Image (cartoon, grey):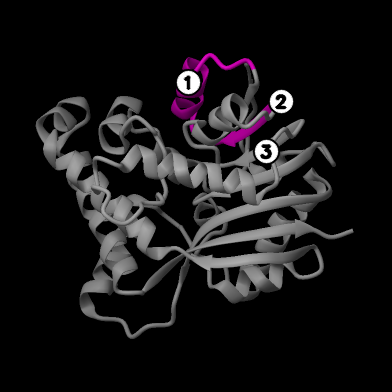
Amino acid sequence: MSTIASRPAEPEVDAVRHHYEVGNEFYRLILGASMMYSGGYWEPGEELVGALDTAQERKLDAFVRHARAEGAEHILDIGCGWGTLMDRATRLHGVKRATGLTLSRTQREWIEGLRNPALTTRVESWSEHENPGAYQAAFCVNALEHFVSSSLPPRERTKRYRFFFQQVHRALAENGRFVLHTMTAEAQPMTREILADLKFLQRSEFEGMHIPHLHELAAAAEGLFEFVEVVNERESFARACRAWLELLAADRPRAVELESEEVVARFERYLDIFAYTLEDRFFNNFRVVLERKG
């Protein structure tokens, strides 16, 4: 396993580190052993918390299959979190090498602790990564929401998303697949509660985060990728948020000890916001499978 550090140039770096450089042990308390920060695939009748790790593993296995990544020589994980997808792909699915991009130094430290020689972690923005045609498959699991600033006008946001898809296109080998898991926003009537909660997310937890509209992504990927599959999995992400809230509540004194009352209260509020906005269909969470053109 190797680690490569660079100086991130992206404006979102401080906002990302504000959220993701809360201690790894705090995240382990919330996320469980899987250390996966996205929706899982529960089967009917499974316990919400009891089956959390299994649900996450089931999801990752499906992602690898959708990407046709079994036995791949090299895969890329953009916004790789704590390395769970890369680690599982190399240990269980025959992937030879995996490179992960993150802006979080504490996530890099966690991945180093996995002691998997097949993993390379780069503290680097997606926009700086250059390794043309090197990857048979790429993944971006609930990280795209941090990549485009909400302060940009709509046309500039689309240009930024276009640049993102161009970067992924360049990184992939011919006919390589890209599995994108991302929240999207629906045009819904705004209540005072939602407005207040969105302001909290923007100002206190995920500064500058823009949750895209599906049409922005479709326009940005046009001509670069063929859309193989688009599936709305909002319920699976809402269930994960509820599971994380239960785990946090079950060991709240320890969470406060690890961080602070202020941090715990922030996480409780933002997880509840995501859960109810997904449940009320204000936000979506799409699994998008794309295949490289050209």
Amino acid identity at mark 1: Glu
Is 168 above or below relative to 125? Answer: below
- Which dot marks residue 109? 1
Please report contact status of discs 3 and 1: CB closer than 8 Å, yes or no. no
The answer to if 116 sits in the magenta stretch is yes
Residue under label 2: 96
Give the CA distance from mark 3 to mark 1. 18 Å
Q: Nearer the viewer, residue 128 or 102?
A: 102
Residue drawn at point x = 52 percent, y = 49 percent: 143
Q: In which quadrant is the C terminus drawn?
A: bottom right
Which one is closest to the eye, mark 2 or mark 3?
A: 2
Q: Quadrant of residue 69?
A: top right
Is 166 above or below relative to 229? Answer: above
Amino acid identity at mark 3: Leu
What residue occupies the far right of the structure in this picture? 294
Label 3 residue SS:
strand
Part of the protein shown in magenta: 97-117
Please report contact status of discs 1 and 2: CB closer than 8 Å, yes or no. no
Residue under label 3: 76
Label 1 crowd bin: few (<14), some (14–19), many (20+), radius 10 Å? some
Q: Nearer the viewer, residue 104 or 228?
A: 228
Label 1 residue SS:
helix
Residue 29 is situated, as x and y percent measured from the top left of the image, at 25, 31
Counting residues from the N terminus, which is met first, the one under dot 1 or under dot 2?
2
Counting residues from the N terminus, which is met first, the one under dot 3 or under dot 1?
3
Label 2 crowd bin: few (<14), some (14–19), many (20+), radius 10 Å? some
Give the CA distance from mark 2 to mark 3. 12 Å
